[in-house]
Every structure is written in C-alpha cells, then in structure tokens.
Image (cartoon, helix red, strand yellow):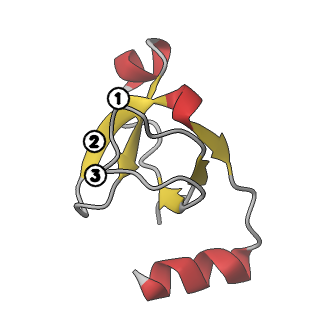
Amino acid sequence: MKQLKFVICIENNDYPASLEKRKIYETISGSDADAEKDGYIRVIDESGEDYLYPATYFIDAHLPKEVQAAVVKAA
C-alpha cells in the first residue's frame, strides 16, 4: 500500500489554472528522485494528472489518518 502524502499550495503564480492557493493536493513522493534533487515534487493537480511543480510552492500538510481518508474518499 502506498503511503499518502499531502501538501498545501501556497503559491501558484506560474500555474493559476493548475493550482489553487490554500488547497490540499496529493503528492507522488519518491517517483522522480532527480526532480526532487532539483527542487520539484510531483503533485496531482486540478487536471487530475500528476505533474512536476516547484517544491517551494507547497508546504507539508500533516493530516491525521482520518482526514487523509476523507480527502481520498472525496477525490
């Protein structure tokens, strides 16, 4: 079972159609080590697909397991 990780968008200047500020997004961590070394993370955005975005556009969302389950169920 994959480990879920969520982030909160704090910046979207270059991607206003793909990212909404203050919204919770699921990440796909560990899928692209080279990109992570370069400061990018893979996020499932508004299109429902995963894309690379600057890691500085997000902060970690430390959500309890119950909240994570509700977020996944709502998606």
35 displayed left or right of 23: left
Q: Amino acid at mark 1?
A: Asp
Query: Between disc 2 and disc 1, whose residue precedes?
Result: 1
Question: Does dot 2 land on a helix, a strand or a loop?
Answer: strand
Q: Secondary structure at mark 3?
A: loop
* Residue at the (47%, 14%) spot, across then down: 37
User: How far across and how far down the image is residue 46, in percent?
Assistant: 31, 61
Q: Which mark is residue 64?
A: none
Residue 47 position (above or below residue 28)? below
- What residue would you read off at disc 3? 17
Kind of residue indicated by mark 2: Tyr
User: Label 2 vs label 1: CA separation?
Assistant: 11 Å
Of 31 and 42, which appears nearest the observer?
42
Q: How many residues crowd around disc 1 within 10 Å: few (fewer than 14), some, or many (20 or more)?
A: few
Q: Amino acid at mark 3?
A: Ala
In the displayed structure, does residue 19 sit left or right of residue 10?
left
Figure check: 46 above or below 18: below
Residue beneath disc 2? 51
Q: Quadrant of residue 34?
A: top left
Of the 4 image quadrants, the one containing the C terminus is bottom left
User: Mark 2 or mark 3: which comes first in sequence?
Assistant: 3
Question: What residue sits right under mark 1 in the picture?
Answer: 32
| Sequence order check, earlier mark of 3 and 1 | 3
Please tell me whether mark 3 or mark 1 is closer to you in this view: 3
**x%, y% of residue 68?**
62, 74
Q: Position of residue 4 (x, y in %)?
A: 54, 60
In this rendering, would 15 be left or right of 25? left
